[in-house]
Amino acid sequence: MPAPRTRRPRPGTPGRVLAWLPDGRPADVYSAPCPSRQVLDRIADKWTALIVGCLSTGTKRYSELRHAIDGVSEKMLTQTLRSLERDGLLTRTTHPTVPPKVEYTLTDLGHTLTVPLAAIRDWAEVHINEVNDARARYDSPA
């Protein structure tokens, strides 16, 4: 008889089973070997949050993304775009022109990230002064 499909209690979403892995185990980002941990790492990345935000308004070319995201290096932008494409969050379309025209678009799966990542970006902008005050208090000699 197979073991019952339950999960250990975890912080944040008690009792919720979000997905089952192909091997029959529940997805659990609190478990180190769970592949959902890698996905969390991808979507918690600042460049991912900014790229998804830019693409939430529509298809963009590489140069448009680079211009919109101040401070991202070409290397980081390229690496992040490749990772997002690999994870099925965006599509890369190359048009046969000279020079080649490359465009990036969020997939349906990528669009599911727009609201949660917008909430995190908004939270950072709303609470930056409180965070900076806390840092100053922490760093100042008592």
Image (cartoon, rainbow, N blue to C red):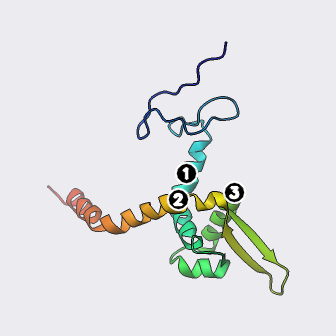
Q: How far, Cα to Cα, is label 2 from label 3?
A: 16 Å
**Tag count:** 3
Which residue is labeled 2 in the image?
Answer: 45
**Which marked residue is nearer to the observer: mark 1 or mark 3?**
3
Which residue is labeled 1 in the image?
Answer: 41
Identify the residue at image location x=29%, y=62%. Answer: 131
Residue 64 in the image: above or below residue 28: below
Residue 73 in the image: above or below residue 32: below
Which residue is labeled 3 in the image?
Answer: 88
Front residue of 113/31: it is 113
The kind of residue on which mark 3 rests is: Gly
Residue 46 drawn at (x, y percent): 50, 63
Q: How far, Cα to Cα, is label 1 from label 3?
A: 15 Å
Q: How far, Cα to Cα, is label 2 from label 1?
A: 6 Å
Residue 30 drawn at (x, y percent): 50, 37
Work out whether mark 1 precedes mark 3 in sequence or the reverse, and give the earlier one. 1
Front residue of 84/26: it is 26
Front residue of 122/131: it is 122
**Which marked residue is nearer to the observer: mark 2 or mark 3?**
3
Identify the residue at image location x=56%, y=63%. Answer: 48
